[in-house]
Image (cartoon, rainbow, N blue to C red):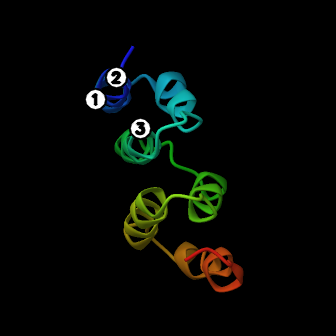
Amino acid sequence: MTEADRRRLAALAGHDGDEPAARAALHDPAPDVRATALGALERLGGLTPDDLVAALEDASVVVRRRACEAAARLPGDGPPSLLAPLVTSSLP
């Protein structure tokens, strides 16, 4: 299966209500698939603060950017507590 296929399946999981498939895509070797998985989980309402913290610590800027966007959309006072991984990170 190609990276594009895996990315498409991750996106479809968010539209089809398949949280286990979206969650599994968080561990894909391809950053674009992991970033798409974050969006799928957000669409499903299944994105947790732990998911965001892990994504903010991801080696890929694509995944970290998607996590920042998702954190900004969280309701309430949650997002400021998610800034610690960014402040303490040595990633570029």
- Kind of residue at badge 2: Leu
Disc 1 target residue? 15
Q: Quadrant of the N terminus?
A: top left
Nearer-N-terminus badge (3/2): 2
- Kind of residue at badge 3: Val
Q: Residue at x 59, y 59 (%)?
A: 59
- Helix, strand or loop under label 2: helix
Q: Which one is nearer the viewer's eye here, 59 or 9?
A: 59
Q: CA distance from mark 1 to mark 3?
A: 15 Å
Nearer-N-terminus badge (2/1): 2
Disc 3 target residue? 33
- Kind of residue at badge 1: His
Q: Residue 46: percent from the left, percent from the top?
A: 50, 42
Q: Residue 35: percent from the left, percent from the top?
A: 42, 48
Q: Residue 10: percent from the left, percent from the top?
A: 38, 29
Is 52 left or right of 9, judged from the image as shown?
right
Disc 2 target residue? 9
Q: CA distance from mark 2 to mark 1?
A: 10 Å
Is 91 left or right of 40, judged from the image as shown?
right
Q: Are marks 1 and 3 in contact (CB under 8 Å)?
A: no
Q: Residue 37, relative to residue 56: is it above or below?
A: above
